[in-house]
Image (spheres, rainbow, N blue to C red):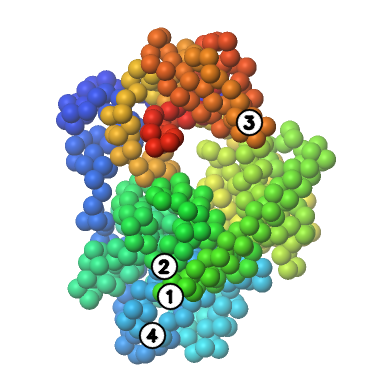
Amino acid sequence: MRWTIKPKPTQEAVDQLSKELNVDDLVSHLLLQRGITNYEEAKHFFRPELEHLHDPFLMKGMQKAVERIELAIENQENILVYGDYDVDGTTSVALMASFLQESYPNVATYIPDRYEEGYGVSFQGIDYAEDNDISLIIALDCGIKAIDKVAYASEKSIDFIICDHHRPGDNLPEAVAILDPKQEDCSYPYKELCGCGVGFKLIQALASRKGKTVEDLITYLDLVATAIAADIVPITGENRVLAHFGLQVINASPRIGIQALIDQVKKRTLTITDVVFIIAPRINAAGRMKHGQHAVALLTETDWNTAKQYAQEIESFNAERRNLDQETTEAALLQIQENAEENRFTSVVYNENWHKGVIGIVASRLTETYYRPTLVFTKSGDKLSASARSVKGFDIYNALEGCSDCIEQFGGHMYAAGLTLLEEQYETFKQQFEKVVAETIEPHLLQPEISIDAQLDLSQITPKLMRILKQFAPFGPGNMTPVFMAEGVQDTGYAKGVGEDEKHLKASVSQNGSMPIGAIGFNLGNKLNLVTEKKPFDAVFSLDENEWNGTVSLQLKLRDIR
């Protein structure tokens, strides 16, 4: 692990903010690192308000989108809500469909089949619209590159409204309206919305035409928060507001489908991290193992017994997904070892029998193991399909653009992407991708990094500090859980390995005679020898609360030691 301490704010800035907020230097230090420089910004950060959300009509294309939907309703047209099969896509479809269906019945939903149709807008989906006399498609979390599909729909007198958040290409589809804050000429103030977030802005605009405010749309925020968490978008600005209130809905009065999922896992209060690792994988499992329409059905269901049944089915999909994930990861790691590719700049593996539903997860696992840009391919129809994952600081989307001459189709973000290519192009692509990455990646990016907010003496850890840090939540990209470093820490004599094969490290530590504090290091059991016999060591950690027999105590959640 490479330990990197973030740049320290100037003492003048720290002093000024500490005085303005009446907080200690450490809290000001952490806030300044997050771009918060004055009382007003701190107030927005610690006390998010729905009124902080931007006017949806600031987004390019919003007026046209609203007018076209209103016209469709006035003319009794059939509307199709179309979305991708992942969490962001299925929550987007559930959000838009349930909002429209509150006042208008002629609304259908469509999720493409991951295996038959692949990612994004499909010709089959448009044929479905034609067969069902649908004249307007609202595409969510996809469509920004569907130039040929939108043209195909236009020939059939089917209009498109595109709500996307992916990077546009040089040319745009000929849609009635395109809502994507990442368009260069879109002046919307916040660029990092997920697909469901863009969908929410559209329903916010539609609701405003009926005299409603965002307060009337709070019940939809459980879907938006779930999408924000699952899509790993920055939890800053507008996303922070949406996630904050969405979590409140999830924990107080979620829609029946989400409640049914929560009941499956017996968790009382969910954080954004819980949504990422508990709720999102289950919603995703529907599209991975069966069909994304199962997730939409769950998220739009209003009958408790039916929702409970759907949740049980999705739980079984998720168990199946976990087994496949493990088997495929083991096979992919073996392929890298057998081909003696441990010293490459990239990991690119392929097996025509791997399940398309888990290749994205497997790509993430391989990235964790070898820490380099990774692609996992499988056969999909007569082409190869891949999921790509990157390492911190390296733009895999740009790297794929450098290989575009041997790719059929690709799309995605800086850290995650998907692509298809012809089987005969696989070896050429593999060599070219290795070459592009080797020539453009900074060597230090191939070593995992722990980013440290500040050095901390253990004596500074108090219940008051913990109470303040908890108010920094919800955590995520752009506002990660604060990470600290302490030097010259010693175990007080209780260090031991715990868990299966003693793979975790448990200790009680102090520093320069400070009061002992518990510490837990997941997957750090192999470093037990560094802390025994009261040997001094440095630790990187976040602060956590440990509840045991009804007693809550502070503990260090160790990230690494040396």
Quadrant placement of the N terminus = top right
Q: Earlier in the sequence, mark 2 or mark 4?
A: 4
Which is nearer the N-term, disc 2 or disc 3? 2
Residue type marked 2: Ile
Q: State which quadrant residue 257 falls in.
A: bottom left
* Residue receiving disc 1: 303
Residue 391 in the image: above or below residue 20: below
Please tell me which of labels 3 and 4 falls first in the chain. 4
**Crowd around label 1: few <14 · some 14–19 · many ≥20 (10 Å):** few
Q: Residue 470, percent across and down?
A: 33, 38
- Is residue 443 depicted above or below 285 in this figure? above
Element assignment for label 3: loop
The tag earlier along the polypeptide, 1 or 2, is 2
The image's mark for residue 105 is 4
The residue sitting at 21% across, 56% down in the picture is 51
Q: Which residue: 34% across, 68% down? A: 202
The residue closer to the viewer here, 311 or 224, is 311
Q: Which residue is mark 2?
A: 256
Instruction: Look at the image and tell me whether residue 111 can be seen.
Output: no
Q: Residues within 10 Å of mark 2 (few under 14, many from 20)?
A: many
Residue at mark 1 to residue at mark 2: CA–CA distance? 7 Å
Dot 1 and dot 2 residues touching (CB under 8 Å): yes
The answer for how far apart the CA atoms under marks 2 and 4 are is 21 Å
Give above or below for 506 relative to 61. Answer: above
Mark 3–mark 4 Cα distance, whole angstroms, equals 55 Å
Task: Identify which residue, 311 or 414, lies in the foreground.
Answer: 311
Residue plotted at (23% across, 63% down): 215
Q: Amino acid at mark 1?
A: Asp
